[in-house]
Image (cartoon, rainbow, N blue to C red):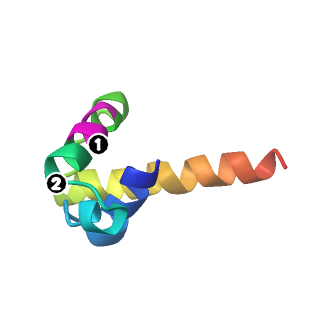
Amino acid sequence: MEVLDAYCATGSLRAADLLHLHHSSAARRLEPIAKTLGIEPTKSTGLMRAGLALTAWRLLNDCGR
């Protein structure tokens, strides 16, 4: 979730810099998330869907507390 959060914040693999990862490592971690969600995060609609999915996940997890 950290990689997805950073990716949504930056909109690019610059997220790797925030996480102190190599860009290819961040891409490898993002890939299964994108497949699971059925999105292409490099496209604007995919990035928006990823952000919405992350927000929904946070809301669902906060409601259980």
Assess disc 1: are there few (<14), some (14-19) or many (≥20) residues with their C-alpha within 10 Å of its C-alpha.
some
- Give percent across and percent down for residue 17: 26, 67
Residue displayed at 14% across by 46% down: 24
Q: Amino acid at mark 2?
A: His
Q: Does 35 appear in magenta?
A: no
The answer to whether residue 52 is left or right of residue 38 is right
- In the displayed structure, 52 sits above or below 24; it is below
Q: Which residues are magenta?
A: 28-32
The answer to whether residue 57 is left or right of residue 16 is right
Q: Which mark is residue 23?
A: 2
Per the image, label 1 sits on a secondary structure element best described as: helix
- In the displayed structure, 47 sits above or below 64; it is below
Residue displayed at 38% across by 52% down: 4
Q: Main secondary structure of the magenta part?
A: helix
Per the image, label 2 sits on a secondary structure element best described as: helix
The answer to whether residue 62 is left or right of residue 40 is right
Q: Amino acid at mark 1?
A: Leu
Q: Which mark is residue 58?
A: none
- Give percent across and percent down for residue 1: 47, 47
Residue displayed at 35% across by 61% down: 19
- Give percent across and percent down for residue 14: 21, 66
The answer to whether residue 31 is left or right of residue 18 is left
Q: Which residue is mark 1?
A: 30
- Give percent across and percent down for residue 40: 20, 44
Residue displayed at 30% across by 31% down: 32
